[in-house]
Amino acid sequence: MNDAHELDAVGLLCPLPVLKARKRMQNLASGDLLVITADDPAAVVDVPHFCTEAGHTLESADTDGPIQRYTIRKG
């Protein structure tokens, strides 16, 4: 995903990963991808909810140990 923008939210707790994602998405064009890396246990609920509420598409959600990686397409 060379065209994806990245947001490192490791170490941030709820609601900071979603707040930072919302801020980053404002500067992206419709259709752009944002990849969020997080380790907040609440992100598994917060990120999909954020996508639904904001009109974005959650393209993928992967977990590698405590690290979660979400790919969001801006709506």
Image: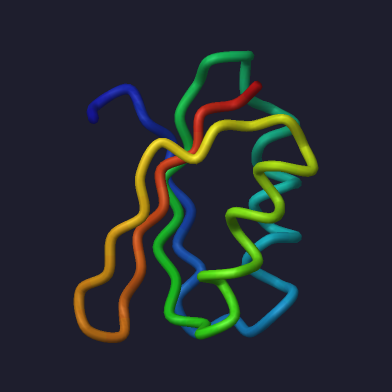
Instruction: Name the one closer to the observer, 19 or 58.
Output: 58
Q: Please indicate whether residue 45 sits to the left or right of residue 65 in the image.
A: right
Provide residue 32's location: percent of width, then percent of height. 50, 21
Instruction: Name the one closer to the observer, 7 or 60.
Output: 60
Relative to 11, residue 48 above or below:
above
Provide residue 8's location: percent of width, then percent of height. 45, 62
Report the residue at 75% width, 60% height from top: 19
Relative to 10, residue 25 above or below:
above
Residue 20 falls in which quadrant of the image?
Answer: bottom right
Quarter of the C terminus within the rendering: top right
Q: Please indicate whether residue 72 sits to the left or right of residue 68 in the image.
A: right
Residue 27 falls in which quadrant of the image?
Answer: top right
Quarter of the N terminus within the rendering: top left
Relative to 6, residue 54 above or below:
above
Provide residue 35's location: percent of width, then percent of height. 41, 45
User: Looking at the image, how many numbered discs can be counted on the residues?
Assistant: 0
Report the residue at 71% width, 51% height from top: 50
Report the residue at 28% width, 60% height from top: 62
